[in-house]
Image (spheres, coloured by chain):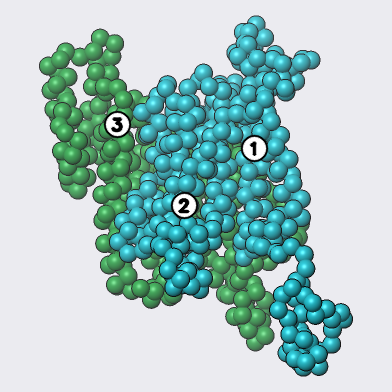
Chain colours: A cyan, B green
Amino acid sequence: MPSDTTFADKPSLDQSHFCADPEKTKLGAIDELRTEGPISSFWSDAWRALRRRPLFWISVFLIAALTMIALFPGIFTSESPTHCELGRSMDPSTSGHPLGFNRQGCDIWARVIYGARTSMTVGILSALFTALIGATVGQLAGYFGGWLDGILGRIVDIFYAVPIVLASVVVMQVFRDRATALSVVLVISLFAWTPVARVARGAAIEAKASDFVTASKALGLGKYAILLRHILPNSIAPIIVTATTSLGTFIVLEATLSFLGVGLPPSVLSWGHEIANAQVTVKTHISVLLYPAGALALTVLAFILLGDAVRDALDPKSATR
Amino acid sequence: MARYVGQRLLQMIPVFFGATLLIYALVFAMPGDPIQAMGGERGLPIAMANRIRAEYHLDQPFFVQYWYYIKGVFTLDLGMSFQRRPVFDIIAQVYPTTAKLAVYALAIEGILGVAVGLISGIRRGGIFDTSFLAVSLVVISIPTFVIGFVLQYFIGLKAGILPATATGGASWRALTLPAITLGSVSFAYVLRLTRTSVIETQTADFVRTAMAKGVTRRKVVTGHILRNSLIPVVTFLGGDLGALMGGAIVTEGVFHVNGIGHTLYRAITRGEPTTVVSIVTVLVIVIMIANLLVDLLYAALDPRIRYAK
């Protein structure tokens, strides 16, 4: 630090924090630090980075709209999705029925609107559950290490060796026609938690080596207290990022299972079913397939954009631009 | 290196038993009585059902069944399907098709993904980069089966450039659309991964040094940037083989490819536990070997992995 530094505005000496007199010490450079205003934390920095991104706002808008549709589908259509008349099978769009009718003579727009609830529920709950399971396993393995890490690590390897589509197709057979959105969520969570666990383990190992953890240990803080107060808060960002980015793939997985006929029973509205049913008429009326597929793609896209934005904000190292 | 290989091989053993036990437990929990289902609506006489049950060891406790099954895996005797065909023969018949499809898909996503990702990374922010980033987002958002239907409809049926189904046999030409479909999502991931990796490597010290030494731009890109950016891509491609095997269930169904995914799907819906377990086991073994090879390749590419304990 050069000793002859001059300052544009010297701070007054009655500041609340300790500050050496810049005239006497020549260490005045320290007062270039901003001491007024709110303290900038990791999360406030991330929020500032996030809200500057237009893609973030686009995804937030889409997700808000989809949430509204999922919660109150009745606002967006007055037609019942289960009101089907074979007499109007494959009829083109008319007033009040913007997308026309499918093979069973059901209103396509109504079925697309009412299908949102399944995708949103399955996606959000699966992301939540995988984050919970993965974070617990990963944090314990990373923090305690040793034999616990060895055992949990092998369990992660086992689940990693079984492809998720294969495993969930096999397990969903157990539920057959009794499947609900919750059973799909549970099956997805059972097989999809391993990426979160790996990330959570790495974060725990990294946080464990930091000075503030050593200090807490020296001050006599208990193992579990350190885990909850220091390790977990410092690992939460990568866990959130992994869970958010995989949310879209869970929505796709549910649609795939329903499409294959092993997901939700036909009585539950799902875009996967709509696409499977439209398969029969794909050669003559591809639009019947494209409407639910478009809705599905838009939903997944919204969550992928959100995941990208959150990752760039929380993990500046992996910035995509 | 030998030590590392040995360690990885030892680690595979518990994973193999764990994964097979997991699959076995999952299939064992399948509902319904497949033996009774064989008899159709009238069902089988009790004595005959019991005889068949004993033949498939279905009357034994769970762990005894698992023991017979593991013994079968090691002696390549995977038992009989309910259609009285050895499961091993069924797998041997359909597996080459799926292997061909998976390799084709892997080649498409690997070559195209790395090429596009490299150009995008080098010309970051340009039109090429921006448009392919948008394309990758759209491709990731659309489920595989929808991509399959759209390609089948527009390229196979409307334009008639490529066969819409592979019912006539699994030639390279017939497998082109299925392979593009199967590899599409991973293509987008490979593209994004390569791009990020190239952007990171571009600012590395050794790249600057090479430039300062006067190495040509072309050599810096291929010899320094590309080679170092490939490490995470190789890992991804190896792990992706499992996803491709899973995706084969969907893709082979859409394009009527007579491969292992289609066979497995039929076995699951028919409730044939022996066939399901055997096929999934073979797939898991293939995936484990692929992961092992990738780890070894990774260790060869990056010495830091080898020497870290």
Picture coordinates of residue A237, whole percent (x, y): 57, 57
Task: In the rendered view, tell whether residue A47 sits above or below residue B34.
Answer: below
Classify 10 Å Cα crowding around label 3: few (below 14), some (14-19), many (20 and above). Answer: some
Give the structural element (helix, strand or loop) at label 1. Answer: helix
Q: Which residue is mark 2?
A: A135
Q: Earlier in the sequence, mark 2 or mark 1?
A: 2
Number of the front mark, 2 or 3: 2
Q: Which residue is mark 3?
A: B29
Quadrant occupied by the C terminus of chain A: bottom right
Determine the chain carrying the residue at label 1.
A
Picture coordinates of residue B132, whole percent (x, y): 68, 52
Number of the label disc, if any, that sits on residue B46:
none
Number of the front mark, 2 or 1: 2
**Measuring 65% from the left and 14% from the top, which residue is drawn there?**
A80
Asked if residue A139 lies left or right of residue A248, the reply is left
Asked which quadrant contains residue B93, the reply is top left
Classify 10 Å Cα crowding around label 2: few (below 14), some (14-19), many (20 and above). Answer: many
Asked if residue B176 lies left or right of residue B285, the reply is right
Which amino acid lies under the numbered mark 2 shown in the image of this protein? Ala
Which amino acid lies under the numbered mark 1 shown in the image of this protein? Thr
**Measuring 34% from the left and 51% from the top, which residue is drawn there?**
A155
Asked which quadrant contains residue B224, the reply is bottom right
- Rounded to the nearest whole Å, what is the CA distance between mark 3 and mark 1? 34 Å
- Do labels 2 and 1 touch, CB within 8 Å? no
Q: Which residue is mark 1?
A: A299
User: Can you see residue A121?
Assistant: yes
